[in-house]
Amino acid sequence: MNLIAETESMASHEDIAHLAYINWQKDGCPHGHDETYWLEAERQLKATKHLLSHEIKQGVPAIAAAKPRSKRAQKSSARPVSAR
């Protein structure tokens, strides 16, 4: 399987379960919301894989392509750090 096809495939049961568990713990381990955490984990992994797939196809980081830096941010990052 090539890298693009791999990133577009569905997340594994184990990946979804792990992310759902992490999200559940972050929220204080509430009872009775198993399905909600599962579906949210699926959505998060699908979104992540979509971004990675876009990044691979375009050869450009997806986040950088989606959010260009302002001219002010570019100028400030180009300034050398002065020694104190």
Image (cartoon, rainbow, N blue to C red):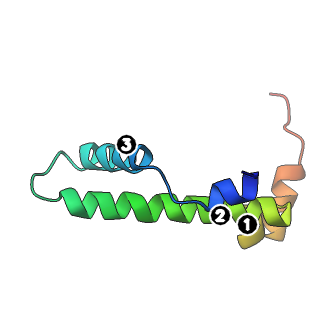
Residue drawn at x 90%, y 41% is 80
Callout 1 crowding tier (Cα within 10 Å): few <14, some 14–19, many ≥20? some
Q: Position of residue 12 (x, y in %)?
A: 46, 50
Q: Tell me the kind of residue under disc 3.
A: His
Between 56 and 67, the one lying in front of the other is 56
What residue type is disc 2 on? Leu
Q: Tag 2 or tag 3, which sits nearer the N-term?
A: 3
The correct choice, above or below, for 6 with respect to 81 in the image is below
Residue on which disc 3 sits: 18
Asked which quadrant contains residue 6, the reply is: bottom right
- Residue 40 vertical placement versus 81 (above, below): below
- The 10 Å Cα crowd at callout 2, few under 14, some 14 to 19, many 20 or more, is some
Give the residue number, with chain letter if any, for mark 2. Answer: 51
Q: Is 4 placed left or right of 83 in the picture? A: left
The tag on residue 10 is none
What distance separates the C-alpha of mark 3 from that of mark 1? 24 Å
Q: Can residue 9 be seen here?
A: yes
Which residue sits furthest front?
Answer: 1
The residue indicated by pointer 1 is 54
Q: Secondary structure at mark 2?
A: helix
Question: Which residue sits at x=58%, y=60%?
Answer: 9
